[in-house]
Amino acid sequence: MASGKQRESTGPRWTQTWLGGAASAGVDLGTPGGRLGLPKEGPGSVATYGRRITALLLDLVVGAFVGALFATALHWSPATRSLANTAVFAVMVWLLTATLGTTIGKKLVGLRVVRLDGRPIGFGWALARTLLLLLVVPALIWDRDHRGLHDRAANTIVVRA
């Protein structure tokens, strides 16, 4: 500077804004589900990652157990058993989500799936959501409201029951 004085900073350095993410730039991301009108805590609030993963693992165990019962009774090969486990899991998730809005695992950890417009999920949207869940990657890409691509495609969100 010509006068020898340093210029006063009016905000964070530009490197701090992109290295630290949106929060360091002063952007208020709010709470998950807040911009969708959902409460911050309690029933109807967005489910945490831990509960969602626990529910998924429980559903996978149930699917594997039922698939193993079929495989043992019908003397299937290991490859067919694996396919049966996946098929049982998929059908279970599809039908239970479409009719009840919850799966066995979600029920055990106190979660449910709801549509953002308040309508029932239905068989079509539940099928689309389940097929994307089976692809794994869409379910791993989450937005700031903790909605995976499978939830965004079906216009659903997983909330606390």
Image (cartoon, grey):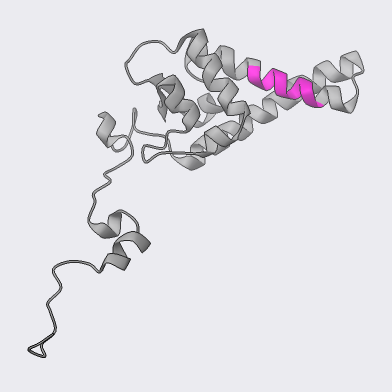
Would you place residue 106 above or below residue 140 in this image? above
Outermost left residue: 3
* Residue 116 rendering spot, x and y as whole percentages: 34, 21
Outermost front residue: 2
Residue depicted at 69% across the width and 30% down the height: 61
Residue 103 visible within the image: no
- Left or right of residue 86, residue 22 in this image: left
Residue depicted at 83% across the width and 24% down the height: 81
Residue depicted at 33% across the width and 34% down the height: 42
* Residue 92 rendering spot, x and y as whole percentages: 63, 17
Residue interval drawn in magenta = 82-90
Residue 45 visible within the image: yes
Of the 4 image quadrants, the one containing the N terminus is: bottom left
* Residue 139 rendering spot, x and y as whole percentages: 53, 33
Of the 4 image quadrants, the one containing the C terminus is: top left
Return the residue nearer the eye: 31 or 2: 2
* Residue 15 rendering spot, x and y as whole percentages: 32, 67
Would you place residue 99 above or below residue 52 in this image? above
Return the residue nearer the eye: 85 or 72: 85
- Let me know if residue 62 is in the magenta part: no
- Let me know if residue 87 is in the magenta part: yes
Our reading of the magenta stretch's main secondary structure is helix
> Could you say which quadrant of the image residue 19 lies in?
bottom left
Count every numbered label the image shows and give the total.
0
> Could you say which quadrant of the image residue 143 lies in?
top left
Return the residue nearer the eye: 14 or 70: 14
- Left or right of residue 73, residue 61 in this image: left
Residue depicted at 55% across the width and 38% down the height: 53
